Image (tube, rainbow, N blue to C red):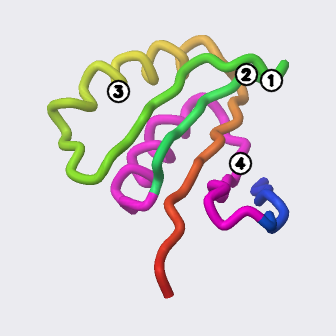
């Protein structure tokens, strides 16, 4: 499942998308999003909508810096059956 935010009149407003994933697919999906390189922030929420983890991303963020986040994601994935990933993306210049 993927939901995108409706277009905003504010050009500075970030574009967000949300994905519902099972706990066992959580790590793979987050790694894929980080690899894409256009995400500003990734938020993981449980079924009730409570934020479990927020991962701020910036250009040039490398794997070593992400190791503590990957450990936390593994712990969340072990406890959660379904999660929602909310991705805040950078606007790409066209």
Observer-side mark, 3 or 4, equals 4
* Mark 3 vs 2, N-terminal side: 2
Q: What's the mark number on residue 18?
A: 4
Cα separation between marks 4 and 2: 12 Å
Relative to 60, residue 38 above or below: below
Residue hosting label 1: 49
Q: Are marks 3 and 4 in contact (CB under 8 Å)?
A: no
User: Residue at 70% of width from left, 48% of height from top?
Assistant: 19
Stretch of the chain drawn in magenta: 10-38
User: Is 87 in the magenta?
Assistant: no
Disc 1 secondary structure class:
loop
User: Residue at 73% of width from left, 43% of height from top?
Assistant: 20
* Mark 1 vs 4, N-terminal side: 4
Q: Are marks 1 and 2 in contact (CB under 8 Å)?
A: yes
Cα separation between marks 1 and 2: 5 Å
Residue hosting label 2: 46
Q: Are marks 1 and 4 in contact (CB under 8 Å)?
A: no
Observer-side mark, 1 or 2, equals 1
Residue hosting label 3: 70
From the top left corner, tell me how far across and down residue 86 is, in percent. Answer: 65, 42
Q: Residues within 10 Å of mark 2 (few under 14, many from 20)?
A: some
Disc 2 secondary structure class:
loop
Q: Quadrant of residue 63?
A: top left
Q: Is residue 70 left or right of residue 43?
A: left
From the top left corner, tell me how far across and down residue 8 is, in percent. Answer: 80, 64
């Amino acid at each position: 499942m993927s939901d995108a935010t409706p277009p905003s009149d504010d050009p500075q407003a970030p574009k967000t998308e949300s994905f519902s994933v099972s706990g066992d697919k959580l790590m793979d999906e987050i790694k894929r999003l980080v690899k894409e390189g256009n995400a500003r922030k990734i938020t993981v929420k449980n079924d009730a909508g409570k934020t479990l983890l927020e991962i701020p991303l910036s250009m040039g963020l490398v794997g070593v810096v992400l190791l503590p986040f990957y450990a936390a994601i593994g712990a969340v994935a072990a406890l959660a059956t379904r999660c929602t990933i909310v991705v805040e993306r950078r606007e790409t210049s066209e």
